[in-house]
Amino acid sequence: MRLRFGSGLAVAAALVSPPVTAAERFTVPVEYLKLDNGLRVVLSEDRTAPTAIVGVYYNIGLRIEPRDRTGFAHLFKHMMFQGSQNLGKMELGRLVSARGGFLNGSTRLDFTNYFQVVPANALETMLWAEADRMKGLAITQENLRNQQAVVKNEVKVNVLNRPYGGFPWLDLPQHANENWHNAHNFYGDLSDLDAATLEDVKAFFSRFYAPNNAALVVVGDVDRQQALAWIRRYFAGIPAAKLAEKPDISEPRQAIEKRASKTDSLATKPALAVGYKAPKRMTPEYFALGVIDQILLQGRDSRLYGALVEGGYTGEVEGGINAPLGNMFDVNGPTLWAFSLVHDAERKADDVLKAADVEIEALRARPIDPGRLDRARVKARSALYDDLERLFGFGRANLLACFALFDDDPGLINRLEQEFGKVTPELIQRTAQEYLRPTNRTVLVLEPKGAPAPTASQ
């Protein structure tokens, strides 16, 4: 799933509007509290449809997993669907589908989440079910063995036996980053997946799946007092855990361009991915990069679309900040602004890169004109609203949960527009000069089988 602010918004790009006033700005209702056991709770009322979204986000993701158990965070996500104290294997799914809803879960860089979208009258049942598996899983050797096989098959289907599998989302970070937490194989090596033991699973659950390491979000057509009463009834009695100290996931400033190559035996055409280390999250420069993303990459009016697609180098160029794992706000550490494309063999990777550099260097050389900045802001605003409504309002729940978990402030959701509005042409130029310099990037070339792979250099 690609969650990118501004993708494909050609219509919005054609509009230029004056700044949005406080009275015109859409405001997300936010009520935030913490239970005594540390669980962060966010409620957001939305009466547009008789539905409710329940999401539980745990502060454990792909970065923070044992060094000799790569892929364990993802494996454990599968374990969470194998039953709990009062629900048998797959019974939660049947509870949801019987009520006309749907559920899912995912493992991202900095969190693992579980959510259901159901009719509003099923809210209590969903809260009870999520609390039941937070209290304890059905951790058995049979379930572990079964899910190890499922995940290994997923790796084979999605990466090993698929053209361009893992390109660039798995490959690029491993070459761009220095810190192991940001640079290892997030899907997991098959030998590491095999080596996971029942004791590993139990220890992982105790360490990370605790109320004081989680955020619970409820969005939809709900009575807030009743919802809070149910939340306290089912979650307040779950004991907090002693949490381990978070590892250092910082990255050093990159000083030289990195180059790497990969040969893909299933690919039919070469491909190119370029990633630049992004500024620190939620800083003025980070919002400036979000606007730059709109200018350079998102939509048919973007400069890279014009240079690379209309220029005849490729049929599609895609990417963004934290793409394709999420959007620029549901990540809580070092990330990349990256773009990737597949191109004909007649077009050399360096020629594609030179065409892209013309547009990137233009941003670094001089301030953007106000009209282009206005269009980029419109695209960012439109994409934000679109994301909030994604999956019947799950996009709103996602941002609220992340801002609670990472920032202890879900109200940030209502200040994003203002931050984009503060971005100036001068800030865009300064941000581009520092973060879009060639010495801050990693270039990854994929060659089909039979083609000579270029020599990787650093």
Image: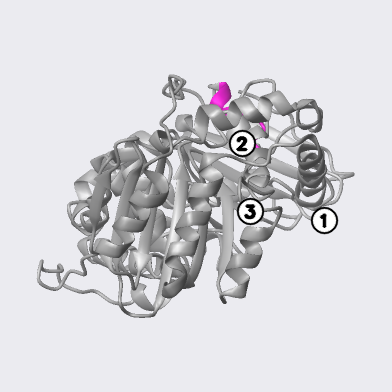
In this picture, residue 330 sits left or right of residue 21: right
Which residues fall within the magenta stretch?
A: 180-186
Residue 73 numbered tag: 2
Residues at circles 2 and 1 in contact by the CB criterion of under 8 Å: no
Query: Could you tell me which quadrant the N terminus lies in?
Result: bottom right
The residue under label 3 is 87
Q: CA distance from mark 3 to mark 2?
A: 22 Å
Residue at the image position 30 percent from the left and 77 percent from the top: 47
Q: Look at the image and say whether residue 132 sits in the magenta stretch.
A: no
- Image spot of residue 86 (x, y percent): 61, 50
257 or 10, which lies in front?
10
Q: Amino acid at mark 1?
A: Thr
Query: Could you tell me which quadrant the C terminus lies in?
Result: top right
Mark 2 is surrounded, within 10 Å at the Cα level, by few (under 14), some (14 to 19) or many (20 or more) other residues, namely many
Residues at circles 3 and 2 in contact by the CB criterion of under 8 Å: no
18 or 190, which lies in front?
190
